[in-house]
Amino acid sequence: MYDPNPLKTMSEQSALDELQGFLEKEIPMYLQMGIRIDQYGPDGLTMQLPLKPNRNHHQTAFAGSLNALCTMAGWGMTYLLLQELGRDGKIVIQRSSIRYHTPVKTAEVFARCEPIADESKAFFLEMLDEKDQTKLDLKVEVPGTSRPAVAFEGSYVVIARG
Amino acid sequence: MYDPNPLKTMSEQSALDELQGFLEKEIPMYLQMGIRIDQYGPDGLTMQLPLKPNRNHHQTAFAGSLNALCTMAGWGMTYLLLQELGRDGKIVIQRSSIRYHTPVKTAEVFARCEPIADESKAFFLEMLDEKDQTKLDLKVEVPGTSRPAVAFEGSYVVIARG
């Protein structure tokens, strides 16, 4: 059963360090694109990348880089949830959709994965423990001036391990 | 009016060379990911990238790279259509959706944008000339063993220039 205030097996900071080390080592495009973790807390998980190597010919962010950043923010959120719940699993993105509302032209580009509601965590854990497979639907946004510049939705499947 | 057999202002090969030169120069991630144009003809436009720099920790293709490859194949198809029609315009992807059906583990990863039907070309051109703005919905697939490993749909907007 999901306890919203579990005794964590590792601190949030060390979970973040582990996530960062994992991505640096295992996903070459994480470093190639210059992706970094910005922050993690009650507002969710924010990752960032520099515009320059990820620009297009309009000097705004290349759609492929924006999508990769959002995909990775959602993947990271799923990874951190597994850590928080003390579970291990293989995380795979199943599908995603993205809307590019306005061009992104800031020197650093941020994408924030929204936090996961307690009831979603509970359902996620229940399915993982009962069926050895579970799913998480996540929303990631690149902020804009009045509304999000980019809105992404991804479905992540987790298959229990060990 | 759209003529399905126009006298081209440049050969398909020189249009392809121009597209490749443009992407190499203007989109740094095109070279970073190792993307190349594979072929262009009646079957559509196929682009490819090498697995190694685009791998994940499962030694299969990173979803972000697959999405970037599909995004670029659709963008390139729109670029080549403008060339074919002798028009100039700013191409922007508006939205896309993608399904990752099966992991992609070939050393070279191919994504094929399906050819554009004559009636779609005619509508595209009519809107461009009448409204100075037009849209193209494109399907791109990464082939798999029995069905596509990845299925992508993107909507590209073109704003007339000059």
Image (cartoon, coloured by chain):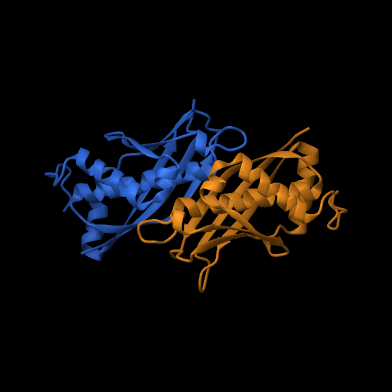
Chain colours: A orange, B blue
Residue A32 makes an appearance in the image: yes
Farthest residue, direction bottom: A146
| B56 displayed left or right of B29 | right
Farthest residue, direction right: A7
Residue A136 makes an appearance in the image: no
| A155 displayed left or right of B38 | right
Residue at the image point whose x is 76% and y is 37% from the top? A131
Residue B90 screen position, x and y as percent: 30, 59
Residue at the image point whose x is 67% and y is 61% from the top? A39
Residue B45 screen position, x and y as percent: 32, 38
Farthest residue, direction top: B145
Q: Quadrant of residue B35?
A: top left
- For the residue pair B79 and A19, the one nearer the viewer reads as A19
Residue A80 screen position, x and y as percent: 72, 50
| A23 displayed left or right of B89 | right
Residue at the image point whose x is 85% and y is 58% from the top? A5
Residue A46 screen position, x and y as percent: 63, 59
- For the residue pair A139 and B35, the one nearer the viewer reads as B35
- For the residue pair A20 and A161, the one nearer the viewer reads as A20
| A46 displayed left or right of A162 | left
Quadrant where the C terminus of chain A sits is top right
- For the residue pair B13 and A34, the one nearer the viewer reads as A34
